[in-house]
Amino acid sequence: MAAKLRAPGLYRAFFAFLLGIAFAAGLTWLVRMATGHATYHHFFSEEPIMAVSLISAPIFFLVGLGGFDYWIYWASGRPTRPEDHSSHGAYSWKDYFRINTDHKVIGIQYTVTAFFFLFVGGLMAMLMRIQLAQPGAEFVSANTYNGLFSVHASLLIFLFVIPVFAGLANYVLPLMIGAPDMAFPRLNALSYWLLPLAGLMMLLSFAAPGGAFADGWTAYAPLSIDAPIGQDFFSVGVQLAGASSIMTALNFLVTIITMRAPGMSFFRMPLLVWANFATSLLVVIATPFIAASQFFVLLDRGLGFNFFDAGKGGDVLMYQHVFWFYSHPAVYIMMLPGFGIISEIIAVKARKPIFGYRMMAFSLLAIVGLGFTVWAHHMFTSGMAAWIRIPMAITTCIIAVPTGIKIFSWLATLWRGILHLDTPMLFSLGFLATFTLGGISGVMLAMVVFDIHVSASYFIVAHIHYVLFGGSLMTIFAGVYYWFPKMTGRMYDERLGKWHFWSTFIFFNLTFGPMHVLGLQGMPRRVPTYSAKFADLNLLISIASFGLGLTTLIFLYNMVTSWRGGPRATSNPWRGMTIEWQVSSPPPIFNFDRIPTVVGGPYEYGVPGAVHGTFAPAPVPATVGGAAGGSGIVHRHTE
Amino acid sequence: MVSRRSIVGAVVAGLIATAIGIALSYAIHWFPVQASTQAHNTDAFYHVLVIASVPIFVLVVTVILYSVWKFRMKPGQELQDGPPIHGNTRLEVLWTAIPAALLLGLVSYSFVVLHENEKKPAGAEMIVNVTGQQFAWSYEYPRSVTGGAPLKTTKLYVPDNESVHFEIKSLDVIHAFWIPAFRLQIDAVPGITTSYRATPDRLGSYPVVCNLLCGVGHGLMRSTIHVVTPTAFQLWLKAQTSAPSSGA
């Protein structure tokens, strides 16, 4: 037992977790003692202990788990072991429950964790639809209902869509660029382990006194300032998820810039790599802003800084500006990696080169730039200075152009191809249709005069689900099916996959389509009850949403049974050209016995004799070629 | 393979689908009744948006369906690839320029409508002060309206065909003052006064809805606006001022 508590791992982590709570209790006790008897009747008070614990306990937990061991060794002058690969790779299922530096293990940790939160968040949506099946229902209390939609959105944004893309890219991207691992494997492990902590924190807020945070994932001040302590679970949870997101983005940027295989110039990179490059730029620049917004809230709540108290010189609208300066780019953070996935799948499944490859790459960069110029379109009715609406409406229209370029390029890639209409392709085509609708309603919302009517109504709920479910989630399903053979070494069940697609596509549209009409008709969002005239459509939506919930069980069943006992996958079941398909399924623990050389573009389908990457002996130094465990090797190539 | 006939067929199918889509967009009752001049403008603009959107959506779906129909893998093609077409600069310029022009045209038109909806009317304008608090709306008719002491009330009456300038405040958190029948809303923000103007043009009673999450009672923070004839409005005002107990 004592040995287990000394060695890094979950035992030590839980022990350290308790220490973290004790630390919080001690710290608050000290501070309250120092501040004096006049101020406090009790030196022990639950709320400050809980609030400080939210910050200290996760950090102690990560230290206990071993997330900082290497750096602690280094900082304290003890011998470090740079070539030690003891924490790299999974040999049994237990290796998924510890600090692991293998990007493939981390990719699966990310993906499975994210899907766990998808199911939890989806279940919350089911509870909300029970409440909304008829007006005036009392299935849950208004406070619980507000908590449900707040936690639903927070989990699905911060614990599902953003990290699941990071997870898929974690697995695939180093393989695609011919790298033995990510640039910073230990940082990679740490950024994964922040996530379950953030997710559990948001979930556990339901157990906090006063209930879960209940003012939406937007947490607008001043409502969030006077909310019960559950609000802190959101503010701190977002810090953890945000820190994870920033670390991963830095890791991707350095990996992409410095670790491409010889011969892989920027314009020979697969578009998934381009997409994650663009996304990582967005994350690194934007995420500090939501961190700031939540630090403001924490300081206002805990220490009375009055950032958002209008009566004491605070500025209420400032919260929204800072919040949306992150949260608008965040919608591209939640979409660009999906664009990358769709590009991979459509090229391979249509057996054609991507139409207009360079424009596809440039349009990603255009979205990165323009993404920072549109944030106040979320605030057309906020009461901000009226003139801001005009430039923001124009930029919002312009940002639709690069997105349109991508849609048209995918369509042109389909043209005259040889379409393999299996599950990943069906999800990709379904994505094109539903995302186009989401894009159109987005452009409508850019029109100030129309937005003034539907802002914050059910029209917004419809729009956001058309882009995040019909957009992001469709691409996630497509990507999971597409790389399932590579990640697990097994094939999924194609028949169940098709069932999953068609049922999802139909129930999705039945659930979210009618919400457009509800919003236009005047139904506000975030309400546990509504006027009787909206009853029929709401009942239809609730029934359809239960169908949509059930469809995910087909997916779950398919994934679990195929992973356990599906037929063995070959190394390249889709005849893809990109490098991840040139190694075994699943790939060797250190990815490549020999670093590949890239000699052509990634999508040269139909070009006779075309090769993208080759493992043939290449003119590179022998030390590089023979390094089976060369995670420390950085190979830079310029053309 | 791509035959001229099948392309013509697809184009015709697309045109028919566009026509049906636009016809449907007129058949569906998207909006509640129009009770202000602003509502007429906004709804007309919405129909323009729909008419511009339907062909784009139909184009995308038609290309997908046509490709699925014509280019799906046939037996014997399992190991074949498509033609190595890498792009077409002219086409790419076109599908950058045309949507850009369309979007800039639409957004310019939206500004025209916005200006029309927000401009100060030539004639008289009445001011109504609106206050949001958890979880109710209250109203105040200033001296300029009552001619005497300001009237505080929880009831909202406005005369037909006269521009009303709503000046909106909040006592606690942010609310949103939304009148769906007018197609207008703005947030009630602590510390500042926000406003919009509406010219009611249809007699009747319409919902007023709080459209920004303001706490546990948000879903029930509703009120009603009554649009009445100018004479009826004056009578109501007189009755309220003579019997202040019926007010807030």
Image (tube, rainbow, N blue to C red):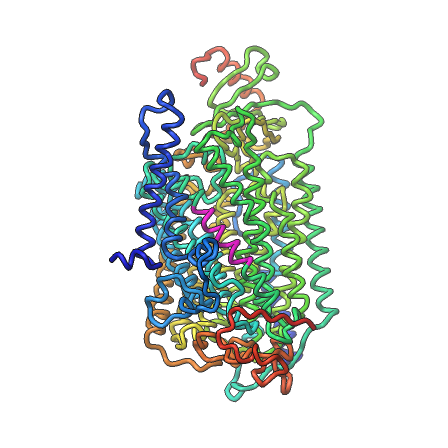
Above or below, B185 relative to A483: above
Quadrant of the image containing the N terminus of chain B: bottom right
Above or below, A285 relative to A307: below
Q: How many marks?
A: 0
Tell me, yes or no, whether the highlighted magenta stretch contains residue A242. yes
Is residue A543 visible in the rendered structure shown here? no
Q: Main secondary structure of the magenta part?
A: helix
Residue at screen point 48% across, 66% down: A82
Quadrant of the image containing the C terminus of chain B: top left
The magenta-colored residue range is A237-250
Residue at screen point 61% across, 40% down: B40
- The image quadrant of residue A437 is bottom right
Horizontal side, residue A517 vs residue A269: left or right:
left
Is residue A377 visible in the rendered structure shown here? yes
Tell me, yes or no, whether the highlighted magenta stretch contains residue A331. no
- Residue A402, given in percent of the width and then of the height, sits at 65, 59
- Residue B207, given in percent of the width and then of the height, sits at 48, 34
Residue in front for this viewpoint, A73 or A576: A73
Above or below, B33 relative to A538: above
- Residue B29, given in percent of the width and then of the height, sits at 52, 48
Q: Residue furthest right?
A: B90
Residue in front for this viewpoint, B93 or A37: A37
- The image quadrant of residue B8 is bottom right
- Residue A607, given in percent of the width and then of the height, sits at 64, 83
Above or below, A113 relative to A23: below
Residue in front for this viewpoint, A142 or A325: A325
Q: Residue furthest left?
A: A1
- The image quadrant of residue A549 is bottom left
